Image (tube, grey):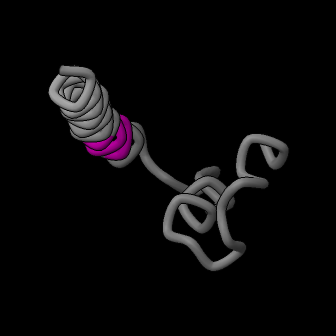
Amino acid sequence: MDDDLSAFRPDAPLTLVAREDIDRLSVDELDARVAALEAEIARTKARREFAVNHKSSAEALFKR
């Protein structure tokens, strides 16, 4: 997993979350963590989709 984090600063929130010790968390805490991470994934994917669509729109506008 550390290879996946190499694009992020060592003190970036994602890096810190990924390196957090989760062994001591309860099942409920793990479920809450998964739900929060899935929500962040959905938010990130939506922002990426917006950026891709925005770029495509701009490119189409300037090709005219």
Residue at (31, 39) in percent of width and height: 44
Q: Is residue 30 above or below residue 19?
A: above
Q: Quadrant of the C terminus?
A: top left
Judged from this view, the residue extending furthest toward the right is 3
Q: Is residue 61 magenta?
A: no
Magenta part of the chain: 33-40
Where, by quadrant of the figure, is residue 4 drawn?
Answer: top right
Where, by quadrant of the figure, is residue 40 drawn?
Answer: top left
Helix, strand or loop: magenta stretch: helix
Residue at (67, 71) in percent of width and height: 9
Where, by quadrant of the figure, is residue 49 drawn?
Answer: top left
Residue 21, position in %: x, y?
65, 60
Residue at (41, 41) in percent of width and height: 30
Judged from this view, the residue extending furthest toward the bottom is 11
Residue at (23, 31) in percent of width and height: 62
Compared across the picture, whether 40 is left or right of 30 comes to: left
Q: Is residue 15 above or below residue 36?
A: below
Residue 17, position in %: x, y?
54, 60
Given residues 4 and 37, the one toward you in this image is: 4
Residue 28, position in %: x, y?
31, 41
